[in-house]
Amino acid sequence: MESNKYKRIAKNAGMLYFRMLLTMAVALYTSRVILQTLGVEDFGIYNVVAGFVIMLGFLNSAMSSATQRFLTFEIGKIGDKDIRGIFSMSLNIHVLIALFVFLLGETVGLWFVRTQLTIPIDRIIAAQWVFHLSLLSFMVTIISVPYNALIIAHEKMKVFAWVSILDVLLKLIIVFVLSWFGFDKLILYGFLSFIVVLIIALVYRVYCKSNFVESKFRLYWDKNLFEVMLSYTGWNLFGNIASVMSGQGVNILLNIFFGPSVNAARAIAMQVSNALNKFVQSLQVAINPQIIKSYASQDMAYMHQLVCYGAKYNFFLLFFLSVPILINTDFVLNMWLGSVPEYTSIFVKLIIVNIIIDCISAPLMTAAQATGKIKLYQSVVGGFLLLNLPLSYLVLSFGSKPYVVVYVSIIMSILALIARLIILKKLMFLPVAEYLKEVLGRSIVISSVVVLLYYWLLVYIFHDFSFWLESIIISFFVLIAVVLFGFSRFERNAIFNKIRVMSERFSHKNI
């Protein structure tokens, strides 16, 4: 039975990797073209304005986590289920959130964009259009949350893969349309992005209507369910506000202190990190339903196993992908973009380090959400994350370079990880000693071995090697380090046996 669960996770992760590879390839290509088409200034304006709109949706982020948790828990629990009631309730609440975000955006948000952001006078009108269009896009995204959550709860990950093909095709069309028309390209980009979001949301809605009977909308309001979800969301809200402030809030600080060009540099760095992080997210999205369902059925041993394995494999995957970029950041950026904004390289390196630390926390976050007891978790962890904003303001006020804000974020991420371990030991009896040994211990050993090996190679071998050859060599050594020091003897034997079985099947087919 447990073997079938692992196979389902592997299958779902495979479909999500397919989806991720498509979106990543198109994102990297379109980022280059859009940066060249819009220019550094307009590209920075778009990212800071669209990012500010996302910041207004702090309530949606909290409710999204609640929707995902309650739907998945309901499907996984033993006994009577009320999936349709939870879905209808969630959809009603998300419509209300969308209306709230619209009102907040068109009043406080519009005032902030007009008066507080550092935007050149001749681009104010275009920035306002981008704000309105981004707000509409975000409203559509908010209303789509229950449908996406339902797909994930049912573990139908192949749907995301197929819809991603449509998504990337539409985004490629945007690139070509921008070069065809002489209309203000910043405004046109905002409008076309809204159309793409609308089409994708409609596709997900149609799929859910056709495949899940519980997705049939009805005017439904359960006071008790609303109070339970609101209580859960209330504490989740604090954590999400902290997360948004540590991300988009710091982005606004950079705009106020340095202007749109630094926002462009950070936006490019975030696209690199997001592309890498999507590999981890694909695995994590596949694992998340199993973590929540195992808690719902009180299979704690399996849940603890998933948390440790998920954190460890997240690190292995992200570290393997990141090392070639970390050692050749300038080359990669120049090859990708041609013209690279100032500070982009250092932003890329530091943000990658930050997401490597955060990736091992991802299963811990899901485990905390699964318990439903998030008051202490969100207040402590959210408190650490929220410190990013005032500490970043403090260091920037003293005249620090813009990338110093990422050092602040790295320190807060380490403190948040420590807090998660302490709290989850109490919440779900997480075996912290095993986690430290299997996740942190193996991660530190692998990192140390690779760093020492790289500097040895740099002195004795890497003199006239090309980027590609150097990347292949260092990636090979990372892979060897993961196999030798990352896996337990049981895991190594399981992997080698799987490879042996696959090779035997392949040999029989060719006979």
Image: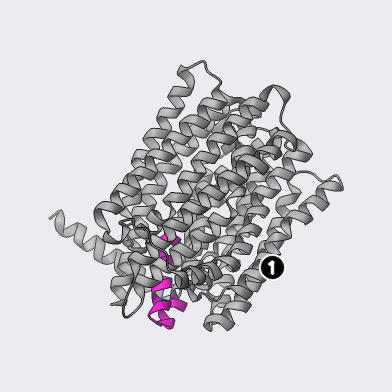
> Looking at the figure, which quarter contains the N terminus?
bottom left
How are the colours assigned in the image?
one colour
> Looking at the figure, which quarter contains the C terminus?
bottom left
User: For mark 1, what is the residue?
Assistant: 415
**Residue at (83% x, 52% y) in the render:** 394
In this picture, which residue range is highlighted in magenta?
A: 283-305
Residue lying furthest left: 511
Q: Report the number of discs.
A: 1
**Residue at (45% x, 43% y) in the render:** 24
Examine the rendered structure and indicate whether residue 27 appears above or below residue 479. Answer: above
Q: Nearer the viewer, residue 207 or 496?
A: 207
Residue 200: where, in percent of width, then height?
38, 42
Examine the rendered structure and indicate whether residue 88 appears above or below residue 462. Answer: below
Residue 70: where, in percent of width, then height?
43, 68
**Residue at (30% x, 53% y) in the render:** 208
Q: Quadrant of residue 58?
A: bottom right
Q: Nearer the viewer, residue 271 or 114?
A: 114
Q: Quadrant of residue 502?
A: bottom left
Q: Label 1's element?
A: helix
For the question of whether residue 328 can be seen, the reply is no
